[in-house]
Image (cartoon, rainbow, N blue to C red):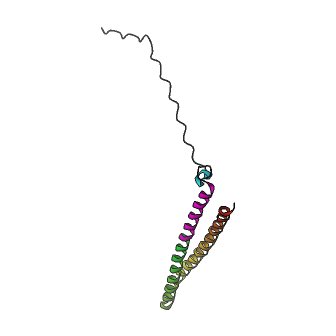
Amino acid sequence: PRPKPKPNPKPKPKPEPKPKPKPKAKPTPLAKMGIGRSKPLKEVLREQKRQITRAVREMEREQRGLEKQENQLKKDIKKACEAGQMKSVKIMAKDLIRTKNYITRFIEMKSHLQGVSLQLQTVILSP
């Protein structure tokens, strides 16, 4: 016969569960902009103004590329028209209109960014 296992006289106490660490709070948009940090406000505004001027330059580059594309499309449309390829002319004309609309949007966005940059400039210079 098999010996019976002895019952465990004292059950082991269960270890207390460790408290879960609190998730780190995501930085607020104001904290991302530098407000609430040790940096002075004028320094933060200066950095923001630099970022805006970089974005304006990037938009100008993109706009120049679109203008080159527009000129190339005009040449291609003339060639296709002389060759009598009217279907391709229609497609290229639609693309030309789309390109012109993109250029005007870039001009609008650039002017908005320049306006924000001027507002930052006045805040930086004000006492």
Query: Which image quarter: residue 9?
Result: top left
Extreme front residue here?
A: 127
| Residue 7, horizontal then vertical, whole percent | 41, 11
Q: Nearer the viewer, residue 100 or 82?
A: 100
Extreme bottom residue here?
A: 82
Q: Nearer the viewer, residue 70 or 123?
A: 123
Q: Quadrant of the image for the N terminus?
A: top left
Q: What secondary structure do most residues of the magenta stretch adopt?
A: helix
* One can see residue 85 in this view: no
Classify residue 100 as left or right of residue 3. right
Q: Nearer the viewer, residue 96 or 117?
A: 117
* One can see residue 104 in this view: yes
Would you say residue 44 sits in the magenta stretch? yes
Q: Nearer the viewer, residue 104 or 48?
A: 48
Would you say residue 33 sits in the magenta stretch? no
Residues drawn in magenta? 40-57
Seen at 60% across and 55% down, the residue is 33
| Residue 20, horizontal then vertical, whole percent | 52, 33
